[in-house]
Image (cartoon, rainbow, N blue to C red):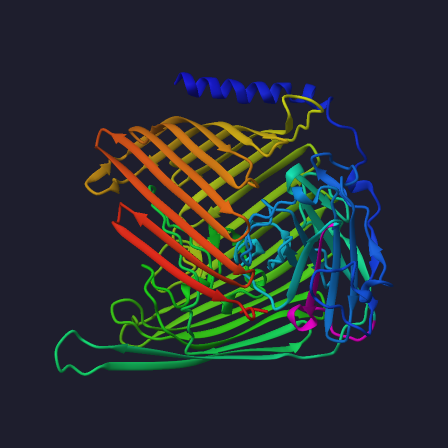
Amino acid sequence: MVIIRLLAAIVVLVGVLGTGFAGAEVPAENPAQLARPALRAMRIEMAPTIDGDVLGDPAWEDVPAGNGFRQTAPDEGRFSSQNTDVYVAYTEDILYFGIVCHDTDPDGIIVADSRRDSSLVETDSIQIILDTYLDQQTGYVFGTNPVGIEYDGQVTREGEGGFGSAGGFNKNWDGVWEVRSKIGDHGWSTEIAIPFTTIRFPRGSQEQTWGMNVQRNIRRRNETAFWSPLPRQFNLYRLSLAGTLNGLEVPKQRNLKIAPYVLGDWQRPGVEEADTEGEGDFGVDLKYSISPSMTFDATYNTDFAQVEVDELQINLDRFNLFFPEKRPFFLENAGYFDVGVPEEVELFFSRRIGIGPEGEIIPIQGGVRLSGKAAERYNVGALYMRTEEVVGVAPQNSFGVARLSRDLPNRSAIGGLFISREGRGQEAQEEDYNRTYSLDGRWGIGKNGLVQGFVAQTKTPGAEEDEYAFNLSGRYDSERWSFSTGYTEVAEDFNPEVGFLRRSGYRKPDIFLMRRIRPESLWGLLELRPHFSYRGFWDFDGFQETGFLHVDNHWEWRNGYEVHTGINFTREGLTEPFEIFEDVIIPVGTYDNTEAQIVFYTNRGAPVAFELRAVVGGFYSGDRIALSPGFRFRIGDTFNTEIGWSYNDIDLPEGAFKTNLGRLRLSYSFTPSIFIQALVQYNDVDEIWGTNLRFAWLRTANTG
């Protein structure tokens, strides 16, 4: 308890002193008030050689450059410590970027990884975002580092909602493009070639203007700078503050991609004179660009064998675990289908198709999918799929999804969603169907405010209670303050069977408030972020099932180290007994507890990095010590090791137990597109060992 009170005092002290620290912040121009830059793309007859040598390639000689990058960190609003030049050109079929990252200390350039889609936070890097519809809400991200990795993703809703196919940034999308980088005496440079068939844009041959921003990381300084300046509270996905790319005469072309597959399996029983048994299978995926802005996908006898395995999780509460979608067929424009609260109430969750409730593989017979933009401002998504019957698991099912939304000015939109599941076959019940209907909207308020919400209704045979859900939330982000609040209500029988619902039958208010403080000179600190958040869940009888009050401060140093010191006040209310562990049953009651929390990171760009999350305090009717250390080690840019461990030591009157979840990830990159990766996991609760070995030669991407 002494430690908990000390942490609470530290957090409160920082908040009280925040106003004093604020007066010492470094004065600089406000990035939000600066003019948005513009750059003209030049049409060229001779394409550049994609080898990373921008300065030595005559194709770039007459192309105008964009520069004048400004920092968000460490010195917000000031010009970058190193110059960066951005060149954009195009031919009939391909959009080219040539970027020169000047550096007065080339030996100080840091490269952390050379695998496709590896993080660009811990390395010197460049990221480009293209708002091809100039709607200030959706975009494509292309990034690389000094060894030329491919990093890409799709942005919807300016990145609101986090990472993954169900969030505002879909990192799992992989486009078809090419990049090469080169380190030299000048620093490093990169050349990028993006076929127009990889991205979607308005139809028409007239000259187009796209939104664009470019981010550069200089890791040894922990510096982040942007071509179109951004305030510290925003990141690259803030498309409403992007610059513009002019002069593009895009082609009127269509693209067809067919990917057949054949699988073979041979087995020989360990019995003399036994015959070798074999079986085979085949299927095909098709992708067709109906127009530059609309994509049609079809699949037959779908194979997802190449998809990376899920990471194991241990569940110590009463609610459902969330696993992200990784299957390529569902990834392009996945954000167009999103309605709800990410990882809490998601009305459409594509993992319900082809995966059983316990992770069983349910064969997909086939399906079609249409996604893209219509008339420039309408976002369209439609899907139909059929799965086979699996005895004891699921009937034969057909799934239909229809989504339409309309972009409005100032980061606003309004839309509707319809989802249907229909069961057939011997495993199906007499009336085996489920429907979901919803309306949603978001409204931008000025430059910093946003209000959004949805209302939904399901229809399930036999439901006796209400089947509705709704959410209304708002947020405000300024340079110094971030504030958000919301209210969610989910009825007892609300049942989106083709969605994700973490829990049902509740009313939940939530609130979050954070202050950003950048002292001019205080112990080498870059930023302090004192904050608090609260979320509470009540059932419809007024009984509180969960309460969580979090008071914290993040201490971020200029050398890359970071510490979070926090205190949590928790409440868990049980109306029925809960088996948390084998033969450990927590009885009915209300449990109020306090716990201390500390998180520690070393410089994540260093060859050796360590992190630790520790939580100590009350847990239901007893106590818990939770430790999650992590260790990363790399040799050059080719070999990476990540070791993670999650440990719980729980002591309850009903019984004591420990849990361990270990994870080892090894990767070796021969080139940015050829690598071998091993993932070993162990969960001692379920006594599961999981091993996955992948050799990848990424000649082309799956979803572009």
Q: Residue at x 38, y 39 (%)?
A: 541
Residue 414 x %, y %: 64, 58
Residue 49: quadrant of the picture: bottom right
User: Is residue 191 found inside the magenta-colored segment of the image?
Assistant: yes
Answer whether residue 138 is visible to the viewer in this image: no
Residue in view at x 31 percent, y 59 percent: 358
Q: Name the foreground residue: 465 vs 315.
A: 315
Horizontal side of 21 relative to 455 (left or right) equals right
Q: Position of residue 123 (x, y in %)?
A: 61, 46
Q: Name the residue rendered at 73%, 34% in the picture.
A: 75
Q: Image quadrant for the C terminus?
A: bottom right
Range of magenta residues:
187-206
Assign the N terminus to one quadrant of the image.
Answer: top left
Q: Position of residue 538 (x, y in %)?
A: 42, 39
Q: Position of residue 526 (x, y in %)?
A: 65, 30
The answer to if 2 sits in the magenta stretch is no
Relative to 22, say whether 601 is above or below. Answer: below
Q: Is residue 416 above or below residue 4?
A: below
Q: 367 or 361: nearer the eye?
A: 361
